[in-house]
Image (cartoon, rainbow, N blue to C red):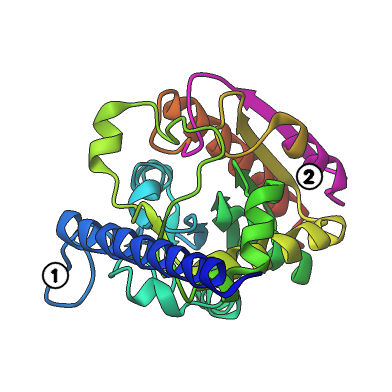
Amino acid sequence: MPVPILIVALLVLGGSIALARRSAFRLREDALRRLPVGRDGIIPGAHAIDLHVAGSAHAVLLLHGGGDTPQTLQYLAEYLHGNGYNVRAPLLPGHGRTVREFSHVAATAWMDAARTAHCDLTARNVWVGVIGLSMGGALAVRLAAADATIPALALLAPYLSMPRNISFAARFAALWGVAVPFVRALDPTARQSIHDPAEVRRSLAYGVFTPAALRALHTTVARAFEALPRVSSPTLMIQSREDNRIAPGDAEHAFERLGARDKQLIWITGAGHVITVDYGRDRVFELVADWLERHRGAAQRDRPA
């Protein structure tokens, strides 16, 4: 390549990178303005959920999705609490704070947080079910694959496979991440993950992903998909037909890989990906509560006198 052309190409490349970085930092600043943190460094409303019922020894662990917070599980937590369960929904590392902290997350930290919360609940209760939403569903799968004693598992729009283009971007995030440290949350269809406009306004999701978070999500999803055949806990999976992040075929494939003999896949309509806050969420809550109650009852019947 002639020297003048090479110089022009380098200048164009440098200008493109500079433009991409400016755009990335605008995304970060927009997120900081939209979601300011409180004195404790956490976005108001994004804190962990911890609800107790006096005298109850039955509990449920709720795990939220990537880039989101326990706020997406608040309605479900309150519903299950009203049904007599102690409920814990931890705020996963890097979430609910600032996107700067989302730049230093790792898949191991998310899994460790889920495992710690589960161990704490099992130490305090005789029965602990596990429910995961989106990426939280992947974490729940890994918990159940490692612990066959989990009596009931509910996977709500579990993120157990990645579109090919997002998977490709995740594998090479260490390269492009130097130039572009923040990207808009990847949405393969441009439809919103929440159809209810009131809940869109309430959302505390960053709306931004970082290279580190994308790599961690890719690792979490891959390990969960690999772990599916090792899950033996009774498993309920609920999926929306209009989910903008998970194709129906991918959901069915993940369900088929589940090792549990007692498993059920239920389809709903009218909601996007975040089915715990979207239209039709009451139906989701009823299905989850029925599943938990059925298997809580089975555990009580099987317990020796």
- Identify the image quadrant of the N terminus: bottom right
Which residue is labeled 2 in the image?
254
The residue at the point 66 percent across, 49 percent down is 165
| Quarter residue 6 falls in | bottom right
Residue 106: percent from left, percent from top = 54, 78
Tell me if I can see residue 149 in this picture: no
The residue at the point 67 percent across, 39 percent down is 237
Q: Which of 239 and 12 lies nearest the eye of the viewer?
A: 12
Residue 15: percent from left, percent from top = 38, 65
The magenta span reads 251-274
Q: Residues within 10 Å of mark 1 (few under 14, many from 20)?
A: few
Of mark 1 and mark 2, the one earlier in the sequence is 1
| Quarter residue 199 falls in | top left
Amino acid at the residue labelled 2: Ala
Q: Is residue 56 above or below residue 189?
A: below
Can you tell which mark lies on residue 38?
1
The residue at the point 29 percent across, 57 percent down is 27
Instruction: Reply yes or no: does residue 252 show up in magenta.
Output: yes
Residue 190: percent from left, percent from top = 47, 33
Q: Is residue 28 above or below residue 287?
A: below
Circle 2 sits in a helix, a strand or a loop, which is it? helix
Q: CA distance from mark 1 to mark 2?
A: 39 Å
Residue 302: percent from left, percent from top = 77, 54
- Identify the image quadrant of the C terminus: bottom right
Circle 1 sits in a helix, a strand or a loop, which is it? loop
Q: Which of 226 and 55 lies nearest the eye of the viewer?
A: 226
- Judged from this view, the residue extending furthest toward the top is 270
| Quarter residue 28 falls in | bottom left
The residue at the point 24 percent across, 42 percent down is 202
Tell me if I can see residue 226 in this picture: yes
Can you tell which mark lies on residue 128?
none
Callout 1 touching callout 2 (CB < 8 Å): no
